[in-house]
Protein backbone atom coordinates (compact mmCIF):
# COMPACT_ATOMS: atom_id res chain seq x y z
CA UNK A 1 0.00 0.00 0.00
CA UNK A 2 1.34 3.44 -0.97
CA UNK A 3 2.27 6.04 1.62
CA UNK A 4 -0.57 7.91 3.28
CA UNK A 5 -0.94 11.50 2.02
CA UNK A 6 -0.32 13.76 5.02
CA UNK A 7 -2.54 16.73 5.76
CA UNK A 8 -3.30 19.15 8.57
CA UNK A 9 -6.65 17.49 9.39
CA UNK A 10 -4.96 14.08 9.64
CA UNK A 11 -2.18 15.44 11.84
CA UNK A 12 -4.77 17.24 13.98
CA UNK A 13 -6.73 14.00 14.44
CA UNK A 14 -3.56 12.14 15.41
CA UNK A 15 -2.60 14.84 17.90
CA UNK A 16 -6.04 14.57 19.51
CA UNK A 17 -5.49 10.81 19.82
CA UNK A 18 -2.09 11.52 21.35
CA UNK A 19 -3.74 13.70 24.00
CA UNK A 20 -6.27 10.92 24.58
CA UNK A 21 -3.43 8.47 25.24
CA UNK A 22 -2.08 10.76 27.94
CA UNK A 23 -5.52 11.02 29.52
CA UNK A 24 -6.17 7.28 29.36
CA UNK A 25 -2.85 6.40 30.95
CA UNK A 26 -3.42 8.99 33.68
CA UNK A 27 -6.76 7.36 34.48
CA UNK A 28 -5.52 3.77 34.46
CA UNK A 29 -2.31 4.51 36.38
CA UNK A 30 -3.86 6.72 39.04
CA UNK A 31 -7.29 5.12 39.30
CA UNK A 32 -6.81 1.46 38.45
CA UNK A 33 -3.68 0.61 40.38
CA UNK A 34 -0.46 1.58 38.62
CA UNK A 35 -1.15 0.08 35.20
CA UNK A 36 -0.93 1.64 31.76
CA UNK A 37 -3.32 1.04 28.86
CA UNK A 38 -1.62 2.89 25.99
CA UNK A 39 2.09 2.93 26.88
CA UNK A 40 3.05 -0.72 26.68
CA UNK A 41 6.75 0.00 27.29
CA UNK A 42 5.84 1.45 30.65
CA UNK A 43 3.40 -1.38 31.24
CA UNK A 44 6.04 -4.06 30.73
CA UNK A 45 8.34 -2.22 33.15
CA UNK A 46 5.53 -1.90 35.70
CA UNK A 47 4.76 -5.60 35.25
CA UNK A 48 8.38 -6.28 36.14
CA UNK A 49 7.99 -4.21 39.32
CA UNK A 50 4.92 -6.23 40.22
CA UNK A 51 6.67 -9.53 39.52
CA UNK A 52 9.48 -8.47 41.84
CA UNK A 53 6.97 -7.85 44.63
CA UNK A 54 7.06 -4.04 44.67
CA UNK A 55 4.10 -2.73 46.71
CA UNK A 56 1.24 -1.09 44.86
CA UNK A 57 1.69 -3.01 41.61
CA UNK A 58 -0.34 -5.96 40.33
CA UNK A 59 0.75 -8.80 38.05
CA UNK A 60 -2.87 -9.74 37.11
CA UNK A 61 -3.69 -6.12 36.24
CA UNK A 62 -0.57 -5.79 34.12
CA UNK A 63 -1.23 -9.05 32.30
CA UNK A 64 -4.84 -8.02 31.70
CA UNK A 65 -3.75 -4.74 30.14
CA UNK A 66 -1.03 -6.24 27.93
CA UNK A 67 -3.27 -9.12 26.88
CA UNK A 68 -6.18 -6.85 26.00
CA UNK A 69 -3.87 -4.51 24.08
CA UNK A 70 -2.55 -7.42 22.00
CA UNK A 71 -6.06 -8.68 21.28
CA UNK A 72 -7.08 -5.20 20.16
CA UNK A 73 -4.07 -5.01 17.86
CA UNK A 74 -4.92 -8.41 16.35
CA UNK A 75 -8.53 -7.31 15.83
CA UNK A 76 -7.49 -4.11 14.06
CA UNK A 77 -4.92 -5.98 12.01
CA UNK A 78 -7.60 -8.35 10.73
CA UNK A 79 -9.85 -5.43 9.80
CA UNK A 80 -7.04 -3.71 7.90
CA UNK A 81 -6.36 -6.90 5.94
CA UNK A 82 -9.97 -7.13 4.77
CA UNK A 83 -10.58 -3.43 4.08
CA UNK A 84 -8.85 -1.79 1.13
CA UNK A 85 -9.94 1.72 2.14
CA UNK A 86 -7.56 3.38 4.59
CA UNK A 87 -10.19 6.02 5.27
CA UNK A 88 -12.67 3.36 6.30
CA UNK A 89 -10.39 1.46 8.64
CA UNK A 90 -9.07 4.62 10.29
CA UNK A 91 -12.62 5.79 10.97
CA UNK A 92 -13.63 2.29 12.11
CA UNK A 93 -10.67 2.27 14.51
CA UNK A 94 -11.67 5.61 16.03
CA UNK A 95 -15.29 4.53 16.25
CA UNK A 96 -14.27 1.28 17.93
CA UNK A 97 -12.11 3.18 20.39
CA UNK A 98 -14.94 5.53 21.27
CA UNK A 99 -17.35 2.63 21.84
CA UNK A 100 -14.92 0.62 23.98
CA UNK A 101 -13.88 3.57 26.14
CA UNK A 102 -17.54 4.58 26.43
CA UNK A 103 -18.35 1.05 27.60
CA UNK A 104 -15.57 1.35 30.17
CA UNK A 105 -17.14 4.59 31.41
CA UNK A 106 -20.51 2.83 31.75
CA UNK A 107 -18.93 -0.01 33.73
CA UNK A 108 -17.17 2.51 35.97
CA UNK A 109 -20.39 4.44 36.54
CA UNK A 110 -22.28 1.29 37.51
CA UNK A 111 -19.65 -0.08 39.90
CA UNK A 112 -19.22 0.86 43.52
CA UNK A 113 -15.45 0.98 42.97
CA UNK A 114 -12.97 0.51 40.12
CA UNK A 115 -9.99 0.25 42.44
CA UNK A 116 -10.51 -3.47 43.00
CA UNK A 117 -12.59 -6.40 41.80
CA UNK A 118 -14.33 -7.21 38.53
CA UNK A 119 -14.95 -3.59 37.56
CA UNK A 120 -11.24 -2.78 37.72
CA UNK A 121 -10.29 -5.62 35.39
CA UNK A 122 -13.21 -4.98 33.04
CA UNK A 123 -12.29 -1.31 32.63
CA UNK A 124 -8.61 -2.21 32.11
CA UNK A 125 -9.55 -4.79 29.48
CA UNK A 126 -11.91 -2.50 27.58
CA UNK A 127 -9.49 0.41 27.49
CA UNK A 128 -6.59 -1.91 26.63
CA UNK A 129 -8.57 -3.31 23.68
CA UNK A 130 -9.26 0.24 22.49
CA UNK A 131 -5.62 1.30 22.69
CA UNK A 132 -4.36 -1.86 20.97
CA UNK A 133 -6.83 -1.45 18.13
CA UNK A 134 -5.88 2.18 17.65
CA UNK A 135 -2.15 1.56 17.87
CA UNK A 136 -2.30 -1.14 15.22
CA UNK A 137 -4.21 1.18 12.88
CA UNK A 138 -2.00 4.23 13.39
CA UNK A 139 1.07 2.07 12.85
CA UNK A 140 -0.22 1.22 9.37
CA UNK A 141 -0.71 4.90 8.60
CA UNK A 142 3.03 5.39 9.30
CA UNK A 143 2.90 9.14 9.84
CA UNK A 144 6.39 10.09 11.09
CA UNK A 145 6.74 11.31 14.68
CA UNK A 146 3.04 10.90 15.58
CA UNK A 147 2.55 7.37 16.88
CA UNK A 148 -0.06 8.68 19.38
CA UNK A 149 1.09 6.48 22.28
CA UNK A 150 4.86 6.80 22.79
CA UNK A 151 7.23 9.78 22.67
CA UNK A 152 10.67 8.23 23.05
CA UNK A 153 11.64 8.44 19.38
CA UNK A 154 9.86 11.78 19.00
CA UNK A 155 11.90 13.30 21.82
CA UNK A 156 15.05 11.66 20.44
CA UNK A 157 14.35 13.25 17.05
CA UNK A 158 13.77 16.65 18.63
CA UNK A 159 17.19 16.53 20.27
CA UNK A 160 19.23 14.60 17.69
CA UNK A 161 17.97 16.66 14.72
CA UNK A 162 18.06 20.01 16.52
CA UNK A 163 20.30 22.92 15.61
CA UNK A 164 22.25 22.23 18.80
CA UNK A 165 23.18 18.84 17.34
CA UNK A 166 23.97 20.33 13.94
CA UNK A 167 20.60 19.49 12.41
CA UNK A 168 17.92 21.55 10.72
CA UNK A 169 15.05 20.92 13.18
CA UNK A 170 12.87 18.94 10.75
CA UNK A 171 9.19 18.49 11.66
CA UNK A 172 9.76 20.63 14.75
CA UNK A 173 6.14 21.71 15.04
CA UNK A 174 4.80 18.19 14.67
CA UNK A 175 7.22 16.72 17.18
CA UNK A 176 6.68 19.50 19.69
CA UNK A 177 2.93 19.25 19.17
CA UNK A 178 2.95 15.54 20.00
CA UNK A 179 4.81 16.20 23.25
CA UNK A 180 2.49 19.04 24.23
CA UNK A 181 -0.60 16.99 23.33
CA UNK A 182 0.50 14.05 25.47
CA UNK A 183 1.33 16.35 28.38
CA UNK A 184 -1.98 18.19 28.10
CA UNK A 185 -3.94 14.94 27.94
CA UNK A 186 -2.13 13.49 30.93
CA UNK A 187 -2.68 16.67 32.93
CA UNK A 188 -6.37 16.86 32.08
CA UNK A 189 -6.95 13.16 32.64
CA UNK A 190 -5.15 13.23 35.97
CA UNK A 191 -7.09 16.29 37.14
CA UNK A 192 -10.42 14.68 36.27
CA UNK A 193 -9.43 11.36 37.82
CA UNK A 194 -8.26 12.96 41.06
CA UNK A 195 -11.25 15.27 41.46
CA UNK A 196 -14.12 13.49 39.67
CA UNK A 197 -13.21 9.80 39.67
CA UNK A 198 -12.73 7.34 36.82
CA UNK A 199 -16.05 7.70 34.99
CA UNK A 200 -15.76 11.38 34.02
CA UNK A 201 -12.41 11.25 32.19
CA UNK A 202 -13.36 8.05 30.36
CA UNK A 203 -16.63 9.62 29.22
CA UNK A 204 -14.80 12.74 28.04
CA UNK A 205 -12.31 10.61 26.12
CA UNK A 206 -15.08 8.61 24.42
CA UNK A 207 -16.92 11.76 23.32
CA UNK A 208 -13.69 13.42 22.16
CA UNK A 209 -12.64 10.44 20.02
CA UNK A 210 -16.13 10.12 18.52
CA UNK A 211 -16.23 13.84 17.73
CA UNK A 212 -12.78 13.66 16.16
CA UNK A 213 -13.87 10.75 13.95
CA UNK A 214 -16.97 12.62 12.78
CA UNK A 215 -15.05 15.84 12.14
CA UNK A 216 -12.27 14.09 10.24
CA UNK A 217 -14.72 12.06 8.15
CA UNK A 218 -16.19 15.30 6.79
CA UNK A 219 -12.87 16.66 5.51
CA UNK A 220 -11.39 16.23 2.05
CA UNK A 221 -8.26 14.97 3.81
CA UNK A 222 -10.10 11.84 4.94
CA UNK A 223 -10.97 10.97 1.35
CA UNK A 224 -7.38 11.62 0.32
CA UNK A 225 -6.25 8.73 2.52
CA UNK A 226 -7.21 6.46 -0.37
CA UNK A 227 -5.39 8.55 -2.95
CA UNK A 228 -2.00 7.38 -4.26
CA UNK A 229 0.86 8.66 -2.11
Image: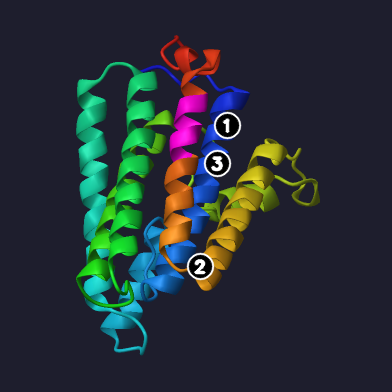
Disc number lying in front (3 or 2)? 2
Q: What secondary structure is found at the residue carrying circle 1?
A: helix
Q: Quadrant of residue 43?
A: bottom left
Earlier along the polypeptide chain: callout 3 or callout 2?
3
Report the residue at 63% width, 55% height from top. Answer: 184
Q: Position of residue 41 (x, y in %)?
A: 40, 62
The residue nearer to you, when weighing 15 against 102, is 102
Q: Is residue 135 above or below residue 115?
A: above
Instruction: Using the numbered discs, state the Cα–Cα distance from disc 1 to disc 2 in whole angstroms.
Output: 30 Å
Find residue 146 and report its horizontal and vertical position in percent.
Answer: 53, 40
| Residue denoted by label 2 | 196
Which corner quadrant of the image does residue 81 belong to?
top left
Q: Residues within 10 Å of mark 1 (few under 14, many from 20)?
A: some
Q: Which mark is residue 16?
A: 3
Check the image and report above or below for 111 versus 9.
below
Label 3 with label 1: CB-CB less than 8 Å: no
Q: Position of residue 2 (x, y in %)?
A: 40, 17
Mark toward the start of the polypeptide (1 vs 2): 1
Q: Can residue 146 be seen at all in this image of the molecule? A: no
Start-end of magenta stretch: 209-215
**Looking at the picture, how far across and down is residue 73, in whole percent?**
27, 44
Residue where numbered disc 1 is placed: 11
Asked if residue 67 is among those painted magenta in the image, a careful observer would answer: no
Q: Secondary structure at mark 2?
A: helix
Residue 199 quadrant: bottom left
User: Measured along the vertical axis of the image, is residue 87 above or below residue 21?
Assistant: above
Give above or below for 225 relative to 147.
above
Q: In this rendering, would 96 be left or right of 20?
A: left
Amino acid sequence: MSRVPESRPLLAALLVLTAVSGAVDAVTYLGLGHVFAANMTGNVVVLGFAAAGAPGFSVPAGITSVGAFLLGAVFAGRICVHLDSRRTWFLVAMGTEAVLVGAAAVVSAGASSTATGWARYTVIALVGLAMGSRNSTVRRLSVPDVTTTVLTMTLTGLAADSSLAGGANPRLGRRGGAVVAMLAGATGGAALELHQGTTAPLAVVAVLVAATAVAFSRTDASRQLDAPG
